[in-house]
Amino acid sequence: MYNPLSKKAQSALEYMMTYGWAILIIVIVAVILYSMGIFNPSSSVTATSSGFSPFVASSAICNSLALKIAFIVGGLPNGATTATLNSLTLSSPTGFSSSSFPITIPLNGTVTSGSTFTVVSPLAKVNCYSSGVSSGAHFAVNGNLSYTVYTPAGKVTLFSTGTIAGINSPSQSLVANFTNSSNIQVPGTSSTATIMEWRSCVTP
């Protein structure tokens, strides 16, 4: 006697025997990729800064307090020996918990080729590691650095663009409450600069 249910069961069994291992392998690979964060949009963001020639964004730290970026000054254009930093505008953020974008950070300092300087965002304006942004997640933001150089032909204001990127850090304490402080640190100069201390906090 013909039994259609038996025929369907046999077809299903043959299908599982033929394709079961392939389906199992696909599931295992998907689980591994998910655990590695492949499907997390923030994991596709590079942790390496780029652009900003003749400057180099050597490192960046972002936490629940602020964004801090360290720059190295390369060879300045048009034969200039010094440059005056005007401002840094940040836009198109990824991985930030704050929404104050675009934002322009005023700068006030003079740098020379081979020197370094650090830009710090205003407190609570640009930050990470809060409102669901976890430690270790990647962040990135476009930057436009305005600076002025003095050449034999006169003063020229230029713009340098690039991407600032890194990995969110746990909450740290930032001390920057000094009178007439600016948003820039220029080591080895007499110009007024923000005095800061970044301190790691250990959760019990």
Image (cartoon, helix red, strand yellow):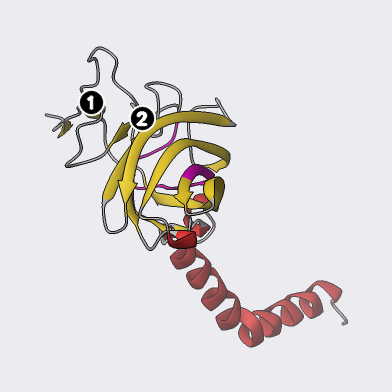
The location of residue 185, given as percent across then percent down, is 27, 36
The residue under the point 46% across, 30% down is 105
Residue 68 seen in the current view: no
The residue under the point 54% across, 69% down is 27
Q: Residue furthest front?
A: 152
The location of residue 90, given as percent across then percent down, is 53, 38
Foreground pick, 152 / 102: 152
Magenta stretch encompasses residue 140 = yes
Residue 159 seen in the current view: yes
Identify residue for label 1: 174
Foreground pick, 49 / 189: 189
> For mark 2, does the 10 Å Cα neighbourhood hold few (<14), some (14 to 19), or many (20 or more) residues?
many
Give the extent of the magenta segment: 132-148
Q: Is residue 112 found left or right of 42 in the rendered image?
A: left
Q: Secondary structure at mark 1?
A: strand
Question: What is the quadrant of residue 102 in the picture?
Answer: top right
The residue under the point 36% across, 61% down is 74
Q: Of helix, strand and loop, which mostly describes the magenta segment?
A: strand
Magenta stretch encompasses residue 3 = no
Question: What is the quadrant of residue 144 in the picture?
Answer: top right
Whether the residues at callouts 1 and 2 have beta carbons within 8 Å, the answer is: yes
Amino acid type at circle 2 is: Ala
Question: What is the quadrant of residue 127 in the picture?
Answer: top left
The location of residue 89, given as percent across then percent down, is 54, 36
The location of residue 125, given as percent across then percent down, is 45, 23
Q: Is residue 66 found left or right of 197 in the rendered image?
A: right
The residue under the point 28% across, 20% down is 181
Identify residue for label 2: 66
